[in-house]
Image: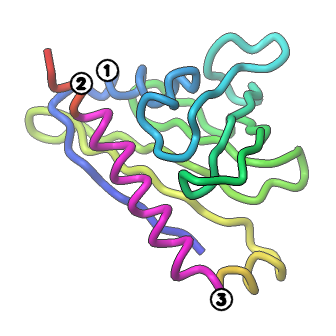
Amino acid sequence: MHDSVTVHINATPDQVWDLVSDVTRIGEYSPETFEAEWLGDATGPAVGASFRGHVKRNGKGPIYWTTCTVVACDPGHEFAFAVGPEGKQLNTWRYQLEAAGDGTDVTESFQLTDNAGLRLYWKLLGWARGRTNRNGMRTTLERMKAELEVA
């Protein structure tokens, strides 16, 4: 109930991290999440900070807001957030950065929470959702790559 995509970007890990951790810009890259905003006192990435994302599922709908909580925040290395209300998260999205040659290998991944309902969902529809997530992760990373490599 997980998958990942890795793309090499000709930019430093710090440059990539600045982009992946700025959730307010996700709408520029993601094919499903078209906007996001920090919640409460949060103004940027920090473990425990919350934000909400505005999602257009499968690029078509339904359209809904979802609350997310930052669970990993290591500048230049990793940014991750769990999706769903506290104690009932459904999924964790993660960006891991590794310096490589002339830039950074960026891995975006998702991991569904291990519970009976999600195991059944994954067994029945996982092939389709997995493909959608894989394509979406590749699209997101390729769009980020295009922006960071312009300079």
Using the rendered view, name the quadrant where residue 112 is placed.
bottom right
**Image quadrant containing the N terminus:** bottom right
Label of residue 15 in the image: 1
**Quarter of the image where one finds residue 102:** top left
> Which of the marked residues, 2 or 3, is nearer the chain's N terminus?
3
Q: Is residue 144 magenta?
A: yes
For residue 148, the mark is 2
What is the span of residues highlighted in magenta in the rendered image? 124-145
| Residue tagged 3 | 123
Q: Of callouts 1 and 2, which one flags the residue occurring earlier in the amino acid sequence?
A: 1
Q: Secondary structure at mark 1?
A: helix
Q: Looking at the image, is 55 positioned above or below residue 11?
A: below
Q: Nearer the viewer, residue 5 or 30?
A: 30
> Which quadrant of the view contains residue 125?
bottom right
Label 1 with label 2: CB-CB less than 8 Å: yes
Mark in the foreground, 3 or 1: 3
Q: Residue furthest left?
A: 102
Colouring used for the render: rainbow
Q: Position of residue 143 (x, y in %)?
A: 30, 37
Of the image marks 3 and 1, the number of the one nearer the N terminus:
1
- On the picture, is 111 further left or further right than 130? right
Which residue is painted at 81% across and 10% down in the image?
A: 41
